[in-house]
Amino acid sequence: MTALELLAPARTADIGKAAIDCGADAVYIAGPAFGARAAAGNSVEDIRDLCTYAHRYGARIFVTVNTIIYEEELEEARKLVQDLAEAGADALIVQDPAVIEMARGTGMALHASTQCAIRTPEKAKFVESLGYGRIVLERQLSLGQVRTIREAVSSEIEFFVHGALCVCYSGQCYLSEYLTGRSANRGECAQACRSRYDLLDGSGKVLMRDKALLSLKDYNLLHRLEDLASAGVCSFKIEGRLKSESYVRNVVTTYNQALNDLIAKYPGKYSRASFGHVSGGVVPDLEKTFNRGYTELFIDGTRGKWSSMDVPTHLGEYVGEVSRITRDGIVLSSSALDLSNGDGFAFVSGNDIVGFRADVAEGLTIRCRVPEELREGTKLYRNISAKFQKRLEAAAPVREIGVALKVSVQAGSLTASAVSEDGREVSRRFDLEGAEPARDKARMLDIIRGQLSKRSAHYSFEVKDIDADTTVPFLAASFLNGIRREMAKELDGMPVKANPLMMGAVTLESAPKELSYKANVANSIDRAIYAQRGTEKMEDAYEISHRPGAELMRSKYCVRYELGLCPKQGKNKPEPLYLLNAGKRLRLTFHCSECEMTVTAER
């Protein structure tokens, strides 16, 4: 049986706990340094606290140590790895091979980050040979490509299913570093793909002005989990280590339900990677949380309209058109939404997105400070639902591990035997000497069943069987509650029987004779690892070499296709094309045989 994992992001330990409460089987989070989101760091003590919480349910904590490491940072990184192991981290998500060497013997599994740019079976086999037990694939892959990689390796396969998309193949984007000096491979991405550009042809003619030409919609594979599982994916990853707690709750709850539905459909084929069932909370709604519009990208091996160039941010749900503007607000012509005080709204004005909040919303009337750009006839969207946000914050779900109880009430004693859903077993005998017999045996047995079939701590007890003598003693509710608490305490003293981590084995798979800057080699340990596998020439990482005229990104996304200028669409638009941003010109080259586009720095 294959254990399927829902992997959630966490900017903080508290958000990580919220994700686990909503059904996540694992959480990925950054420590104090070397995570690929510099603004999402956490102390080792916070990581320790989150690990303790997660391990109650057999859930895992994966820590991102997935930047490239400079030579002078090696000792700092080594100490962090040891500290994370002591804190209880289950795995490290890694890009730089040096971290693999640092983690030997710590007991932590190693996962090859999506920053490793794994999109072919050959690359997957080589990465696996370094000692990774899991590889995180590039997002711009089809199901067929995922399946081919799965067949080539033994390691687990992790795949993103939801959230923001990088336009470039992950780990090989140098655009932010080129434009701003902030490297994506160092956790400081300036999100240059969300910036606005002018599009020029070779003669300098402006074809488009001020558009987010490299901005993609958000990923949403909610309805493709079965396809991915069939292709060999075991971990379904949600993007969003910079997202809010309400975002994480909403998305995790949605995918938790979908994964449970998949397992219910194939009960003998799939199971969950952790334990506990989730109850309570709100009905999730992905349309009410941040998104730039959704796409399934290349999952079916075909192109679609992937761009969010007109709206590179969250517009939200369509509300209606503005019918009239008054001194203290606006009136809508119609709306299918139930608006409320405090809702956030947005509209498009030229090439800008303008937002505002409602002071009071009653029917079709919104009282607010009216933005100067708003006009009658403008289409209005709601990007913050105040009611939904309040429900998310107020109605936290509860996650409980099921415990089956068998109770035997014999002369002078009660024996309770418990088996948790992960297989822990506890049996306790309680002395009943001197207890008065109950006047009504049937009613007393109902009381025993009812009091013991309740929640204690994070356990949900259920009495499955009661064996009793002819005479049953009267037992107070407080006594029975004490039995349940004692059983919970004893279960807590036993480690959850979690699924084993996959630990990779190091082999000497041959590496290419030459490695370009795209291999992101940044330190002497990297060089030694590649040299041992046959590499004779290695270029320094782009962040070190800053090679003139370097390819800054490569992508399945194509500006010509998005604009209807692709030769396969019957067009013959000359190339190259150019992007202009803050005086810097970027060359777009179209590799039609591979159906890829590259962005190159002008010399």
Image (spheres, grey):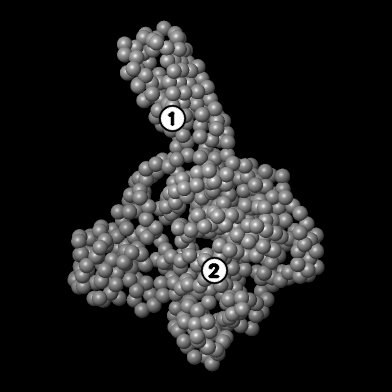
Tell me if 339 is positioned left or right of 542 in this view: left
> Looking at the image, is mark 2 or mark 1 nearer the viewer?
2
Establish if 319 lies above or below 25: below
Quarter residue 331 falls in: bottom left
Mark number displayed over residue 301:
2
x%, y% of residue 161?
Answer: 50, 58
Q: Residues within 10 Å of mark 1 (few under 14, many from 20)?
A: many
Q: Compare marks 2 and 1 and give the one earlier in the sequence.
A: 2
Establish if 395 lies above or below 407: below
Residue ID at (40%, 19%): 479
- Whether residue 241 is visible, yes or no, is no
**Residue hosting label 1:** 461
Q: Farthest residue in the top direction?
A: 434
* Identity, as a three-letter code, of the amino acid under mark 2: Gly
Q: Secondary structure at mark 1?
A: strand
- Residue nearer the viewer, 206 or 422: 422
Residue ID at (39%, 77%): 351
Distance from disc 2 to disc 1, alpha carbons, whole Å, reads 48 Å
Establish if 463 lies above or below 121: above
x%, y% of residue 448?
Answer: 38, 21
Q: Are marks 2 and 1 in contact (CB under 8 Å)?
A: no
Q: Residues within 10 Å of mark 2 (few under 14, many from 20)?
A: few
Residue ID at (51%, 34%): 421
Q: Secondary structure at mark 2?
A: loop
Residue ID at (58%, 55%): 232
Mark number displayed over residue 344:
none
x%, y% of residue 79?
Answer: 67, 49
Tell me if 417 is positioned left or right of 291 in this view: right
* Identity, as a three-letter code, of the amino acid under mark 1: Phe
- Residue nearer the viewer, 519 or 445: 445
- Whether residue 266 is visible, yes or no, is yes
